[in-house]
Amino acid sequence: MIKYRQSRLVRVGFFGAVLIILVIAVGLQPERIVSWANTIRYQAEFVEAGGLRAGDAVRVSGVKVGSVSAISLRGGRALVDFTVSSGVQLGSETTAHIRTGTLLGERIMTLDSAGDSIMKPLSVIPTTRTASPYSLTEAVGDLTTNTAGTDLGALNQSLDTLTATINQIAPQLGPTFDGLSRLSQSINSRNDSVAQLLHNTASVTGLLSERSQQVNEMILNSNDLLSVLVERRQAIVALLQSTSALAQQLSGVIQDNEKELAPMLEKLNSVTAVLEKNRDNLATGLPGLTKYLTTLSEIVANGPFYTAFVPNLIPGQFTQPFLDYAFGFRRGTDAGQPADNAGPRAELPFPYNGIPQGPH
């Protein structure tokens, strides 16, 4: 029982001491305890710290969101530990820069959030996404160091040479500057035209800006058209390749079966010649057939019968005497007398009309 009570007292004393230490720590530095609960820790590598110190502000878009907690050296580069408020989310491609915060040279670290995903706690921003500050003091010191080694004698000689050269070309510089002056005056005299040109350019730019959507659609439609043309080109190329392959196959087949195909081709040529001859005959006969059909249409157009006139079926000089006698007209002697038993007289080869004529 005594051993049990002693071990229990030791355990209670240990937990009590730990609790007292925690209470003292919270009482002395409560802001640190709160920061541990409300901030996220990140790291960034820089080629050089550039005067950045622990406690300097960390800003995002000009707003302080955290502070630098520590700076250490790792692999020849400055490793900066900093904390950011847990309410600020940084992208996976965030960049860090050391900049000058005040005129007195106080440094701050700025963050530019980027990336689709969120950067995890304790992530390290590599040197490819960090930039060190520009130090005016270091730049002036480098300038002093570089100018200290300048050869003043050579510099003076160069300036003397430049002066002599300018003096030599001075006569030619006058006309040159006169020409530049006239050019300037010409441009100045056309100031209104230039202003109108710029105004028209602005109008064109505004019009293009208003119709940017249509221009964009036109470009997209042109891309679609070009895509279709490319597809058609590929299809034509494939067709030509297939046609070439088919021609080669047909050439091989013809060469292999030349003996069997030659008689067939000769017969085919004969049939073709006959067809061409018939085609020519039809072409020759169609104009005459047109005239025949036109005449036939005129013959049967008056009714359900044929209307036809056949001239010179019997020559008139042979039938005229008989007609004269039949109708009581005499010819030759006693012309114009009534008919008698005298037969018709044929006056060959060309009988004349025996019908009496009126007085002239």
Image: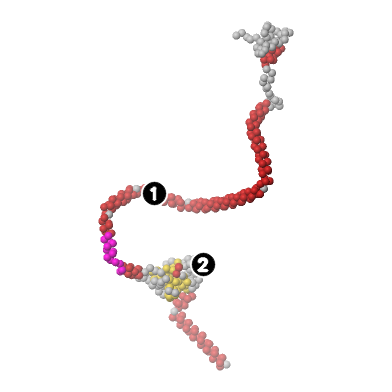
The residue range painted magenta reads 148-161
Tell me the residue that label 2 is attached to.
117
Residue 59, position as x, y percentages in the image: 43, 69
Q: Residue furthest top?
A: 334
Q: Using the image, determine if residue 212 lies above or below residue 37.
A: above
Q: Is residue 202 magenta?
A: no
Going 65% across and 12% down the picture, which residue do you hit? 352
Answer whether residue 69 is visible to the viewer in this image.
Answer: no
Viewed as shown, does residue 179 lie left or right of 264? left
Q: Using the image, determine if residue 294 lies above or below residue 67.
A: above
The disc at residue 6 is: none
Q: Using the image, determine if residue 197 lies above or below residue 351.
A: below
Number of other residues with Cα within 10 Å of mark 2, as a class: few under 14, some 14 to 19, many 20 or more: few
Going 49% across and 86% down the picture, which residue do you hit? 17
Q: Nearer the viewer, residue 82 or 63?
A: 82
| Position of the C terminus by quadrant | top right
Going 39% across and 69% down the picture, which residue do you hit? 133
Residue type highlighted by circle 2: Ser
Q: Quadrant of residue 153?
A: bottom left
Q: Is residue 156 magenta?
A: yes
